[in-house]
Image (spheres, rainbow, N blue to C red):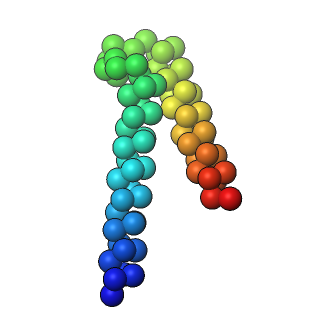
Amino acid sequence: MNQIINMVIRMVMRRMVNLGINKGIDVAAKRGKGGKDLTPEQRQAAGQQTKRAKQAVRMSRRIGRF
């Protein structure tokens, strides 16, 4: 019974941490500006930065498994 509870807690915590990381990356990519304050070039650059940051987080998680 204890293993099941631990498994559920781990799943919930993993989702919460991932959500927090993604939100932080999004805020950092926009540098605190609202979406309507960005020019199209800045918006595209922010999207690319966000994509690269998320890829880097995924890669670091993979490396951390070994």
Split into 4 quadrants, where in the image is the N terminus? bottom left
What percent of the width, then of the height, locates residue 25?
44, 33
**Place of residue 22 in the rendered image (x, y in percent of width and height, measured from the top left):** 42, 41
Above or below 44: residue 39? above
Q: Quadrant of the C terminus?
A: bottom right
Residue 24, placed above or below residue 34: below
**Residue depicted at x 32% and y 77%:** 5
13 left or right of 25 in image: left
Rendered image quadrant of residue 31: top left
- Front residue of 21/51: it is 21
Could you tell me residue 56's position as x and y percent? 60, 39
Residue under the image location 58 percent in, 51 percent down: 61
Who's the residue at 51% across and 14% down the image? 41
Occupied quadrant, residue 65: bottom right
In the image, 6 versus 29, the foreground residue is 6
Q: Is residue 20 above or below residue 53?
A: below
Residue 42 locus on image (x, y percent): 48, 15
